[in-house]
Amino acid sequence: MQNQNVVITGGTDGIGRAAAIQLAKLRVRLLLIGRNPDRGEAAVAEIKRVSGNDAVTFLQADLSLVKNVQRAAQQIRETFDRLDVLAHCAGNLFPRQRTLTKEGVELSFAIQYAARFVLTNELLDLLRTAPAPQVLSVAGGGTISGKVDFDNLQGEKSYGFVEAIKTTSRACDLLTVEQIARYPEITFYNYGPGLVRSGQIVKNPVMRLLMNTVGRPFSRSAEQAANDIVALVRGPYASGFYVSSAKRNDAPESADAASCQTMWGYGQTLAAKLSAAAQHVSTVSLAALRRRSARRSNASASICPSLGTSSPWRPTVARDPSGETNAVAAHFTPKETEVQTFFSDF
Ligand SMILES: NC(=O)c1ccc[n+]([C@@H]2O[C@H](COP(=O)([O-])OP(=O)(O)OC[C@H]3O[C@@H](n4cnc5c(N)ncnc54)[C@H](OP(=O)(O)O)[C@@H]3O)[C@@H](O)[C@H]2O)c1
């Protein structure tokens, strides 16, 4: 992997940092993303020291905001002329209460789904310049059973942190299946590390004690998870779902084509709406989106019959052959009269 360009979101702590250390030893060029500059600089210094590799840099960005994800993508494009590996490790595992970002998106969903969706899409061209580009997402690896509730993706109806973890993991599963279908020139891994002694799990003193005692046999270290990540990107492995020890897992049963396309449409709509807001080009209220979606829902009932007709997202799905046209944004070009309160309906 020598001289490959690798971006790791959340590369400053936990699983991401452990993977960064191992990859630095393989002489790749690394760019780590995180919010906290002190943590970022400390990680860079440590990784350089233990690996002897000086090609390690830090990019400060809070990826819970789509506008920051887009800015980070621009900075990555300015840093690298080719991207070999994009590893999504940023995440927050235990948001105890439902929290909305400044853009009005539920925090877990923002980091673990929206950021991954947008960053990957923004970097497709840069990835395609690499001979064998790879995108890896640390999530559930297809292990979380159950359907995605499209009307409660952001905890709108009910919220609990376990439910939030399950929902974002399932959403990532659907995203992976859709990405594999759309971009066969890129290898996509959805990797579920199992229970890892990192992040919020060990920051809480009681949890740390539990994990280092009774929970130890059931959990793994960040380094073990990193071993799997490095094994996958060193390859050769096919696109798909992987769990501990880089074992292949089946694609989740719930990832039927209609659900995957619906999830993709949801991501596109959200990204289009938030980037429009960020650029002050135009805005459209979610209420208007819902009204328009409801009008189209009958026409597209066959796309995803499991959803109720009230779902605002169902009719937004439009698979375009190139995979890049923003079909949803095109659908929802707002009229002047619809430009009203942007986030009021979240
Ligand atoms: N630990 C587990 O058992 C487990 C199991 C399955 C899946 N996962 C997933 O694996 C990923 C890594 O987990 P971990 O245990 O290694 O977590 P961690 O130790 O808490 O590390 C999280 C990393 O993400 C960064 N980060 C968090 N929020 C961010 C944001 N808004 N923008 C940019 N960077 C952000 C953190 O840096 P800053 O705080 O400085 O931003 C840090 O570098 C997460 O997505 C998690 O959901 C973990």
Image: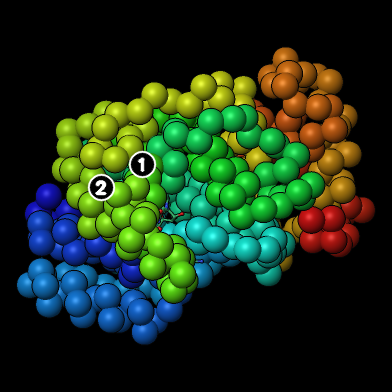
Report the side of 235 relative to 241 (left or right): left
Q: Secondary structure at mark 1?
A: strand
Kindly indicate the quadrant of the structure image that contains residue 106: bottom right
Label 2 sits on what residue type?
A: Ile
Q: Visible in this render: residue 199? A: no
Residue 237: % across, % down: 22, 32
Kindly indicate the quadrant of the structure image that contains residue 256: top right
Report the side of 114 relative to 4 (left or right): right
Work out whether 310 lies above or below 203.
above
Q: Visible in this render: residue 201? A: yes
Residue 103: % across, % down: 68, 64
Label 1 residue near ligand 1, CB within 8 Å: no
Label 1 sits on what residue type?
A: Tyr
Q: Secondary structure at mark 2?
A: helix
Q: CA distance from mark 2 to mark 1?
A: 8 Å
Work out whether 260 lies above or below 14.
above
Q: Residue furthest front?
A: 214
The residue located at (39%, 24%) in the rendering is 250
Q: Residue furthest bottom?
A: 38
What residue did someone put label 2 on?
A: 229
Sooner in the amino-acid sequence: mark 2 or mark 1: 1
Q: Residue furthest top?
A: 302
The residue located at (43%, 25%) in the rendering is 251
Quadrant in which ligand 1 is drawn:
bottom left
The residue located at (30%, 49%) in the rendering is 217
Residue 81: % across, % down: 26, 57
What residue did someone put label 1 on?
A: 191
Report the side of 136 relative to 45 (left or right): right
